[in-house]
Image (cartoon, helix red, strand yellow):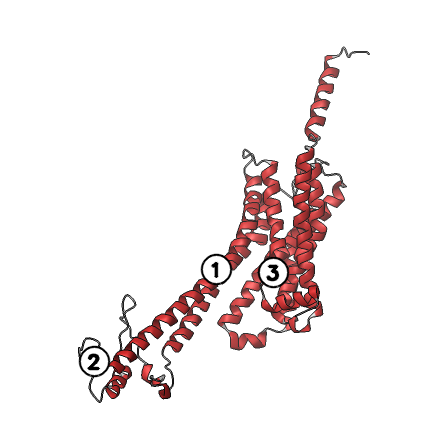
Amino acid sequence: MAFPTNLYTVTEIVNDTLNATMSEPPPPSLTWAILTGTSLSIVTLTSILGNALVLVTLTVERHLRTPANSLIGSLAVADLLVSLLVMPISASYELTQTWRLGRAMCDIWIILDVTCCTASIMSLCIIALDRYWAITDAVKYVHKRTPKRMMVMIGVVWLLSLCISIPPVFGWRKPEDTADPNNCLISQDHAYTIFSTFGAFYIPLIIVLAVYYKIFRAAQARIRKRINSRAKMGLSQAEGEPTENHLADVERPGAQNGTLQTGGRAMRYSRRLNGGHAADNNNPGLTPDAVTTTEALQSRIVTQKKILFSKERKAAQTLGVITGVFVFCWLPFFLVALIGPFCSHCHISDVIKSVVLWLGYVNSMVNPFLYAFLNKDFQKSFKKILFGRR
């Protein structure tokens, strides 16, 4: 074997060897590949089945084809496309650690990824807005909530998603983003990074948080109003308890620590029970009927307040789960996506990048459970389709 005698030739060989070593990462271990492949396959298949079932149900069951459910259908379409067109390629990329499909396919994959994930996030946003309008302006919104209006909202979601995903193909990226044929990266251009991350996530996030907070406050006010009105209603006179008129001012402002102040009509009712004499809790001569009446009123108010707190807690839990899952799944990815291009000295490992990416994909898997499977009407239809019974 002949050895090179020229120093320049030796340097070239060393550089070529180092470049090849750096561009071709070592193959992952078999155990890592099996565990990763199994986990990603479970996420992908679960997402496909869940979102496909939602769309089949909306197609088969006519009574579910409402304007509000069309938004859930749009969400399911976006998540199904993520599951079918994005996740399998991403899983292959994770396992091989090398992009082998060429530059054109890289651009197509990134467009599909950004478009479908953004459409999913924006669909969550318009679902929140739809619920807010339905609660705060129910009478007027029932006439505005037409299929045409829903289709326009869905169309805007997909159009905005395309507007966010396509610009890099027309040059809004750095030359080095496409320099390595073994790597497929979204545009790292600073201006595009701000545009895409805020348009696809941060602005929808602010809207979702603000809207769900207002939904909770509106629901809280409605629950309190309903409970308070029921608390002021008595049983029939035939049962010997006061009617709504007698309980109109049972609970007065200024009651503290759960103490109820009775007066007005309740006091007059006590007088009638006591033969025309005033009944007072502090009066040793208080008649048994008057004592029973006052205790019944207090017990009724306490019971209604317990119901109030229970319903408020349930509403808060539901909205908290929906919002919390959304933030938990997507916030880590968009933090990394926003910080990475601006922080050249920050080293974010490939493992972290992979975890936060697939955590975002997990949102497409859990959305059917949050927005459809927990709905009683959908549950009945699922049982009918899957098991042939209602």
Residue to which mark 1 is pinned: 317
Q: Inspect the image, locate mark 2, and give the three-letter code of the amino acid beneath it.
A: Leu
Which-is-in-front pick, marks 2 and 3?
A: 2
In x, y percent, where is residue 335? 54, 45
Q: Position of residue 356 (x, y in %)?
A: 58, 44
- Distance from disc 1 to disc 2, alpha carbons, whole Å, reads 45 Å
In the displayed structure, 213 sits above or below 170; it is: below
In the figure, residue 78 lies in which quadrant?
bottom right
Which quarter shows the N terminus? top right
Marker count (numbered): 3
- Kindly check if marks 1 and 2 are in contact, taking CB atoms under 8 A apart as contact: no
Q: Name the residue that disc number 3 marks.
A: 123
The answer to whether residue 263 shows anywhere in this view is no
Marks 3 & 1, CB-CB < 8 Å contact: no
Q: CA distance from mark 3 to mark 1?
A: 21 Å
Question: Tag 3: residue type?
Answer: Ser
Place of residue 42 in the rendered image (x, y in percent of width and height, measured from the top left):
67, 48
**Residue drawn where x is 61% and y is 45% of the image:** 357
Classify 253 as above or below 204. Answer: below
**Image-quadrant location for residue 57:** bottom right
Secondary structure beneath dot 2 equals loop
Answer few, some or many: residues within 10 Å of disc 1's Cα (few below 14, many 20 plus, some between 14 and 19).
Answer: few
Label 3: element kind: helix
Q: CA distance from mark 2 to mark 3?
A: 63 Å
* 111 sits to left or right of 377: right
Q: Is residue 9 left or right of residue 289?
A: right
Q: Nearer the viewer, residue 139 or 197?
A: 139
- Upstream in sequence: badge 2 or badge 3: 3
Q: Quadrant of the C terminus?
A: bottom right
Depth check, mark 1 against mark 2: the one in front is 2
Q: Identify residue for label 2.
A: 286
